[in-house]
């Protein structure tokens, strides 16, 4: 419900977070905005200063505003959504001037029916942010003559930084794509912000729908739906599934709570919503009773033994630590095989105790490469490794080998968070090794 006050009573406006509407003498809304302090923001608009959006004239808001409407909200995300909803409804002329100046933001939902010739890209819905809503050809490359269809957009949002922060939080609750996804894990997969390379399409569509409803101001409907799902699984004694919905509800309520405050989009101190924890990735469910917070992944790249190189990439708390990436040129007297090259790479790494040892060494390959890596420890006299584990990840069968265990562990049997992290680390080490090998090969061919 909108409350109104006359211009002369501006000091009686609430000094609270919310949305305000400026109206002219005909009671027509001419401008809508949001603020953490409605009273102070409106007073700023009513000052006789020049308005940046209309540089050639005096401040029109000061001369034309006769009454002020306002809605108090619980917090800034709610004000952001309410502001967008009211701008779309009233179409105030001074907001439209800003929109034409491309200062507004829209959230677009690209549908699943995207037809593309690139078979490596998943045909899944994804979310994007833009200044200008566009039509979208669902059959872009397959048929250029098909009529374009409008993309569902929500907006306008006046504050790009704020809408990005809200979406960042929502993504932790309802993972989504931000562009067509390939067949390999991306940097967001292992922290469960992305559905991954093998998504459940129906789940993706459901997550997108939930976000659309929230941005359209229908958060209560989403929470009611989540509570029904939680009760259904709880009644069926499926408590793990019920707990997922419970955590989603708590996280969603946290975003729209009274004490939630917007922070700068690049603020690294942004608190984490306790729905995803990336600090420890454990094998406990597989019966090993140990976990890790840091890992180093190793890969070898060569062409028939020529110009062999090794890569080392490091992940701390689930994220790449590129300052600790290393590359090694393998130089052995005899023609090296894969095992000897891996042994040499680990031996060279262990000669640098000033580089902090990880909790886990992840070797690319199978049992042979794992044994070679372990044998490198004995070659480094005086090397003291404590609380460090070794494992090998084979690409072909997507299985993990651990010392002392006869059977391999299928990645499909692992927790999704752990599986995606191991695959991402393996693929990143492969990329880093191949890039270095190609650079050396090009350099040699130019001599």
Image (spheres, helix red, strand yellow):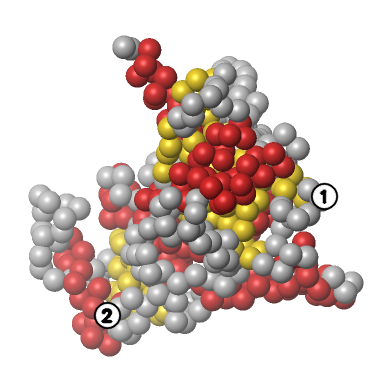
Q: Which numbered disc covers residue 369?
A: none
Please report the residue visible at 62 percent of the width from the left and 22 percent of the height from the top. 117
Q: Quadrant of residue 264?
A: bottom left
Q: Residues within 10 Å of mark 2 (few under 14, many from 20)?
A: some
Q: Can residue 403 be seen here?
A: yes
Q: Residue furthest front?
A: 381
Please report the residue visible at 66 percent of the width from the left and 45 percent of the height from the top. 370
Element at label 1: loop
Residue 294 vs 272, above or below: the answer is: above
Q: Quadrant of the C terminus?
A: top left
| Horizontal and vertical percent position of residue 92 | 34, 57
Q: Quadrant of residue 144?
A: top right
Q: Can residue 207 be seen here?
A: no
Along the horizontal axis of the image, is 394 left or right of 185?
right
| Horizontal and vertical percent position of residue 331 | 45, 30
Residue 76 vs 156, above or below: the answer is: below
Mark 1 / mark 2, whichever is N-terminal = 2
| Horizontal and vertical percent position of residue 42 | 25, 73
Residue 396 vs 223, above or below: the answer is: above
Please report the residue visible at 53 percent of the width from the left and 29 percent of the height from the top. 301
Along the horizontal axis of the image, is 217 left or right of 33?
right
Element at label 2: helix
Q: Nearer the viewer, mark 1 or mark 2?
A: 1
Give the CA separation, mark 1 to mark 2: 68 Å
Query: Which residue does the numbered mark 2 point to in the structure image?
Result: 39
Residue in the foreground of this view, choosing between 51 and 330: 330
Q: Quadrant of residue 33?
A: bottom left
Total numbered labels:
2
| Horizontal and vertical percent position of residue 170 | 54, 62
Query: Which residue does the numbered mark 1 point to in the structure image?
Result: 407
Find out whether the residues at labels 1 and 2 contact each other: C-beta distance under 8 Å. no
Please report the residue visible at 71 percent of the width from the left and 53 percent of the height from the top. 403
């Amino acid at each position: 419900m909108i409350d109104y006050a006359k211009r002369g009573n501006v000091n009686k406006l609430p000094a609270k977070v919310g949305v305000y509407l400026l109206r002219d003498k005909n009671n027509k809304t001419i401008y809508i905005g949001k603020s953490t302090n409605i009273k102070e923001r409106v007073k700023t608009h009513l000052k006789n200063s020049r308005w940046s959006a209309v540089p050639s004239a005096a401040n029109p808001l000061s001369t034309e505003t006769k009454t002020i409407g306002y809605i108090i909200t619980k917090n800034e995300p709610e004000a952001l959504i309410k502001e967008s909803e009211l701008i779309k409804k009233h179409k105030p002329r001074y907001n439209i001037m800003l929109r034409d100046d491309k200062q507004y933001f829209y959230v677009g939902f690209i549908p699943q029916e995207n037809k593309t010739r690139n078979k490596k890209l998943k045909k899944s819905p994804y979310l994007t942010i833009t200044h200008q809503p566009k039509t979208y050809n669902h059959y872009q490359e397959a048929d250029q003559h098909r009529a374009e269809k409008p993309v569902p957009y929500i907006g306008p949002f006046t504050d790009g930084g704020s809408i990005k922060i809200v979406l960042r939080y929502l993504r932790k609750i309802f993972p989504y794509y931000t562009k067509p996804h390939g067949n390999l894990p991306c940097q967001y997969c292992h922290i469960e912000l992305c559905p991954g390379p093998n998504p459940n399409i129906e789940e993706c569509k459901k997550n997108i729908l939930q976000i659309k409803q929230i941005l359209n101001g229908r958060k209560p409907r989403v929470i009611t739906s989540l509570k029904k799902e939680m009760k259904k699984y709880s009644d069926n004694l499926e408590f793990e599934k019920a707990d997922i919905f419970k955590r989603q509800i708590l996280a969603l309520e946290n975003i729209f709570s009274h004490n939630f405050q917007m922070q700068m989009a690049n603020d690294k101190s942004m608190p984490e919503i306790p729905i995803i924890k990336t600090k420890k990735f454990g094998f406990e469910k597989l019966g090993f009773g140990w976990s890790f917070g840091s890992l180093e992944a190793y890969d070898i790249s060569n062409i028939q033994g020529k110009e062999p190189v090794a890569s080392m990439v490091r992940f701390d708390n689930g994220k790449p630590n590129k300052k600790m990436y290393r590359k090694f040129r393998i130089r052995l007297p005899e023609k090296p095989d894969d095992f000897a090259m891996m042994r040499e790479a680990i031996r060279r790494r262990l000669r640098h105790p000033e580089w902090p040892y990880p909790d886990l060494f992840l070797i690319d390959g199978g049992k042979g490469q794992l044994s070679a890596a372990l044998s490198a420890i004995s070659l480094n006299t005086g090397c003291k490794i404590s609380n460090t584990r070794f494992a090998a990840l084979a690409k072909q069968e997507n299985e993990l080998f651990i010392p002392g265990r006869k059977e391999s562990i299928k990645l499909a049997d692992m927790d999704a968070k752990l599986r995606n992290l191991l695959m991402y680390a393996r693929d990143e080490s492969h990329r880093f090794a191949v890039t270095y090998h190609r650079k050396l090969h090009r350099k040699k061919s130019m001599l």
